[in-house]
Image (spheres, grey):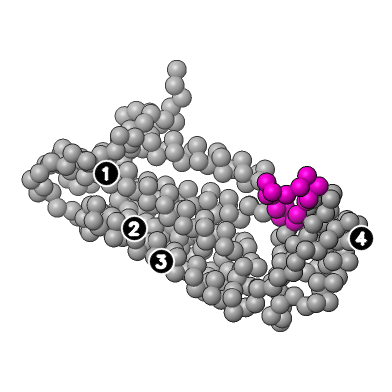
């Protein structure tokens, strides 16, 4: 007996209320833009500047002890991570402590660094401070520009790829879904003021890839069915295609979410922002591949007069039972 999250032959009508779905997406995009414009993002150390202190001790790194020692100093955003390296000796325990630049200052002052070191020595007597590195606002500004460029180039590459593989209507639908996902992810980080750092940029690029994969699976089936059902209206062909790939879409999303939710609950503070972005991205990416990309394709229309069959159309994994 196999577990099925979605029965084999579904006949959901995804386009009976397509205006409602596009309206919901438009409202969410506007809210995301408004939140970003009014309160901006809660940038982490990567984008705001700060100081990284590398420590070494013979005692195992206890992040809780380190954090309890530094918290009374009220230094704002502090990230503590243990560094693992197979070349380290058995008694070589290394940690990285990242402290954000304080308000009105370009970097953490020497006095603040001495206070941090004194607090850590009191908690871990044999601790040594291997290096202290600072990131100024100029470097942080360059990182913001580079990160934004990376996201834009990724979406541009997707536009070209889909355009070459399918047609321009498919390409615009896919890119609209990707832009929708990125804007909503940035918007929720702005609205909730969750720390936004380079790890979130990595999550955004991962979301772009995940959403694109979902969209391409649906579009492959659409292209195949457009040849198979030449007389059916485009809306009906899209409904058939989405229902045929729905089992695969739900199974992929649910299994991915199970892993991500486990990481969010058990993974600790260091990766929580990244995992939250991925959870949100999987949800909106699944939604957009059905209700945004396909709806844009329905609105734009697509030609139906292909003469030559396409033996590469379709996806062998699109109809997996869930």
Q: Is residue 120 left or right of residue 148?
A: right
Q: Position of residue 257 (x, y in %)?
A: 53, 42
Give the extent of the magenta segment.
Answer: 80-95
Q: Quadrant location of residue 200?
A: bottom right
Q: Tell me, yes or no, whether the two marked residues, 4 and 2, touch with CB atoms within 8 Å.
A: no
Which residue is at a point 62% across and 68% down the rendered structure image? 46
Which residue is at a point 86% across and 70% down the rendered structure image? 115
Q: Alpha-carbon distance for marks 4 and 1? A: 62 Å
Q: Alpha-carbon distance for marks 3 and 4? A: 47 Å
Q: Is 155 a magenta residue?
A: no
Q: Nearer the viewer, mark 3 or mark 4?
A: 4
Give the residue at the far left of this rendering: 307
Taking depth in this image into account, of 50 and 282 the one nearest to the observer is 50
Badge number at residue 122: 4
Tell me which label, 3 or 4, sits earlier in the chain: 4
Tell me which label, 4 or 1, sits earlier in the chain: 4
Give the residue at the far bottom of this rendering: 104
Badge number at residue 158: 2
Q: Which residue is mark 1?
A: 220
Tell me which label, 3 or 1, sits earlier in the chain: 3
């Amino acid at each position: 007996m196999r577990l099925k999250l979605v029965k084999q032959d579904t006949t959901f009508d995804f386009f009976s209320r397509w205006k409602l779905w596009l309206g919901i997406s438009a409202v969410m995009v506007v809210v995301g833009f408004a939140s970003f414009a009014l309160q901006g993002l809660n940038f982490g150390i990567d984008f705001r500047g700060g100081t990284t202190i590398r420590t070494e001790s013979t005692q195992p790194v206890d992040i809780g002890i380190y954090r309890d020692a530094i918290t009374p100093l009220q230094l704002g955003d502090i990230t503590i991570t243990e560094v693992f390296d197979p070349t380290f000796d058995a008694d070589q325990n290394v940690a990285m402590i990242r402290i954000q630049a304080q308000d009105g200052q370009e970097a953490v002052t020497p006095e603040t660094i001495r206070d941090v070191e004194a607090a850590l020595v009191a908690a871990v007597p044999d601790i040594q401070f291997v290096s202290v590195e600072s990131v100024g606002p100029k470097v942080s500004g360059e990182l913001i520009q580079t990160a934004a460029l990376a996201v834009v180039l990724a979406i541009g590459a997707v536009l070209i790829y889909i355009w070459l593989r399918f047609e321009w209507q498919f390409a615009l639908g896919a890119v609209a879904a990707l832009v929708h996902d990125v804007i909503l992810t940035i918007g929720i980080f702005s609205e909730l003021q969750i720390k936004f750092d380079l790890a979130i940029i990595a999550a955004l690029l991962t979301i772009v890839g995940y959403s694109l994969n979902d969209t391409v699976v649906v579009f492959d089936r659409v292209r195949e069915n457009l040849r198979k059902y030449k007389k059916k209206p485009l809306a009906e062909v899209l409904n058939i295609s989405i229902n045929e790939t729905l089992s695969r879409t739900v199974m992929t999303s649910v299994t991915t979410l199970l892993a991500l939710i486990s990481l969010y609950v058990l993974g600790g503070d260091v990766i929580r922002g990244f995992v939250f972005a991925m959870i949100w991205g999987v949800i909106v990416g699944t939604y957009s591949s059905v209700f945004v990309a396909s709806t844009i394709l329905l609105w734009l229309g697509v030609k139906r007069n292909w003469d030559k069959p396409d033996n590469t159309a379709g996806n062998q994994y699109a109809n997996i039972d869930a």
